[in-house]
Image (cartoon, grey):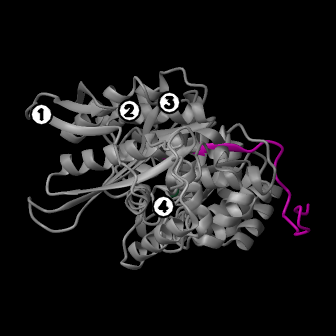
């Protein structure tokens, strides 16, 4: 197989590639992450919608809460199969049986290092244990996926023996785990090519990201004939994490033209939900779901982008449920700023434009992150525009205590009219933003895309900086709020964003 550009691609892919998501098991093993059963269920429902084939919901024997979570997910009637992980002990297998999970991810180590140092057992004992555990789990109606721990650092012939004895006992699938991420794309291809020639049941690929190659190794394993890609949303997992499902799926779809059950347009919303519920934000430059994945600032790039988006995007943001964002800054070119101004109906003269352009560059040179709200402010200033904001905050009050929900009431001036809104939220910031959304929803379909906060100074009276991204249709804009009070900073940022999105000078002649 060769790509459109004449580059050879490995192509011993199986006819049908399946996905096993382990965000709720391996992903939850990320330090500092613990999900309550209701939140695990929300993620599982989202993964089911996404088109995941097997959802590993947890480790049933680990705790009472974990058992409840697996059971809750396993009894929802999801389209996906629900799996629980467990070790090779009767206690662990019984927990999986009782949890109502259909599949057991049976974890048994196969490297001498793990067998001898961790379990203080011999290779022979592990072979016997594998046979007993697979037989026991199968006799209780479970499907069994044998996860050979540290398989890639195991003696290959011994690993095969373990898999073959498991096959003889009726195992449904075997997955050699690259537990410490030591594969590379070429060794992964070689390893799986050898394995699938001998093993008769479907083979899974389970890669860790210690060398940043988990996704590449997963794709290489599949291209060698492995059938099931294991991974997590956002690449969550212990240490450097697991293969990121969203990256594997998009690579297979876009680079290898594979038909998948994954609804790629749901990848971004799934990623956002997992970030929110786990409290682990993705790095801005992360592929597919990172904040900057479809953001363009530099002048050369934005000029190309505005002419034809494929100049600097290998796939359109809509593929993964996102929209493009042209950011302003010192690298901005005149095309991008003109486009931004035009979207607000602002048409400066060439002289005015040069002044606006210069001021934006100066802001960027001072190390400032230039927001769309800054561009609007500068343009209004340079062009002497009235600067009448459609929304202004007049008053805001809060109620709520340690045990009651936060409630915010806002009084806004919207296009000259005084309007009141009230809403609840998980805390004062959430309640206040909800109250503003409540007021504007009558007239504007504006959504909050992203909310980031950082303290600039220390202490409880620290100055906080809040950056929000808001979207109206396909347009995303950013604004900043700075204040000692986090609620006030948040309100300023949100209201600035709404004002940018609702600014329309097109009916006034701005060419002065
Ligand atoms: Mn793992």
Residue receiving disc 2: 69
What kind of element bears circle 2? helix
Q: Earlier in the sequence, mark 1 or mark 3?
A: 3
> From the Cβ of disc 1, is ligand 1 less than 8 Å away?
no
Q: Nearer the viewer, residue 125 or 442?
A: 442
Give the spatial CA distance, label 1 vs label 3.
37 Å
Measuring 59% from the left and 62% from the top, which residue is drawn there? Answer: 336
> From the Cβ of disc 4, is ligand 1 less than 8 Å away?
no
Q: Residues within 10 Å of mark 3 (few under 14, many from 20)?
A: some
Q: Position of residue 211 (x, y in %)?
A: 55, 73
Give the spatial CA distance, label 2 vs label 4.
22 Å
What kind of element bears circle 3? helix
Q: Disc number at residue 18?
A: none
Measuring 32% from the left and 43% from the top, which residue is drawn there? Answer: 495
Q: Position of residue 60 (x, y in %)?
A: 40, 38
Q: Nearer the viewer, residue 8 or 472?
A: 472
Residue receiving disc 4: 241
Give the spatial CA distance, label 2 vs label 1.
39 Å
Q: Residues within 10 Å of mark 2 (few under 14, many from 20)?
A: many
Residue receiving disc 3: 45
Q: Residues within 10 Å of mark 4 (few under 14, many from 20)?
A: many
Q: Disc number at residue 397?
A: 1
Q: Is 114 part of what is drawn in magenta?
A: no
Residue 10 vs 265, above or below: the answer is: below
Q: Earlier in the sequence, mark 3 or mark 4?
A: 3
């Amino acid at each position: 197989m060769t790509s459109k550009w004449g580059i050879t691609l490995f192509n011993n892919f199986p006819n049908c590639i399946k996905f096993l998501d382990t965000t709720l098991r391996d992903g939850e093993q990320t330090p500092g992450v613990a999900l309550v059963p209701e939140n695990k269920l929300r993620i599982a429902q989202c993964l089911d919608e996404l088109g995941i084939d097997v959802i590993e919901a947890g480790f049933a024997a680990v705790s009472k809460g974990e058992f409840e979570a697996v059971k809750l997910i396993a009894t929802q009637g999801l389209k996906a199969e629900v799996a629980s992980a467990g070790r090779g002990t009767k206690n662990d297998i019984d927990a999986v049986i009782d949890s109502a999970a259909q599949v057991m991810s049976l974890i048994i180590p196969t490297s001498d290092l793990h067998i001898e140092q961790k379990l203080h057992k011999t290779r022979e004992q592990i072979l016997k244990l594998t046979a007993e555990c697979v037989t026991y789990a199968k006799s209780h109606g479970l499907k069994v996926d044998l996860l050979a721990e540290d398989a890639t650092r195991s003696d290959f012939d011994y690993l095969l023996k373990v898999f073959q004895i498991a096959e003889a006992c009726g195992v449904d699938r075997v997955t050699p785990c690259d537990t410490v991420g030591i594969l590379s794309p070429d060794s992964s291809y070689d390893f799986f090519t050898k394995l699938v020639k001998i093993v008769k049941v479907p083979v899974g690929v389970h890669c860790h990201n210690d060398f940043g190659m988990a996704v590449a190794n997963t794709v290489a394993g599949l291209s060698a004939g492995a059938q099931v890609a294991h991974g997590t949303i956002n690449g969550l997992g212990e240490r450097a994490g697991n293969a990121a499902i969203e990256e594997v799926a998009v690579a297979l779809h876009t680079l290898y033209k594979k038909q998948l059950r994954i609804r790629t347009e749901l990848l971004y919303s799934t990623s956002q939900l997992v970030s929110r519920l786990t409290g682990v934000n993705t790095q801005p430059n992360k592929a597919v779901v990172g904040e900057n994945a479809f953001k363009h600032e530099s002048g050369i790039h934005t000029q190309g982008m505005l002419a034809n988006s494929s100049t600097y995007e290998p796939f359109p943001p809509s593929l993964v449920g996102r929209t493009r964002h042209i950011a302003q800054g010192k690298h901005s070119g005149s095309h991008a700023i003109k486009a931004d101004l035009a979207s607000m109906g602002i048409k400066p003269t060439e002289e005015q434009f040069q002044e606006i352009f210069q001021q934006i560059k100066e802001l960027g040179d001072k190390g400032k992150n230039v927001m769309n709200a800054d561009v609007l402010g500068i343009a209004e200033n340079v062009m002497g525009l009235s600067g009448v904001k459609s929304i202004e905050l007049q008053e805001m009050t809060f109620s709520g205590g340690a045990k009651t929900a936060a409630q915010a009431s806002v009084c806004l001036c919207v296009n000259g009219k005084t309007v009141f809104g009230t809403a609840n939220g998980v805390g004062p910031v959430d309640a206040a933003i909800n109250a503003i959304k409540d007021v504007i929803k009558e007239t504007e379909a504006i959504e909050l895309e992203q909310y980031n906060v950082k303290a600039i100074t220390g202490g409880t009276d620290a100055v906080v900086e809040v950056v929000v991204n808001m979207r109206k249709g396909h347009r995303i804009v950013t604004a900043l709020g700075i204040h000692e009070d986090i609620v006030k900073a948040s309100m300023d940022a949100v209201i600035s964003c709404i004002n940018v999105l609702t600014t329309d000078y097109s009916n006034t002649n701005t060419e002065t």
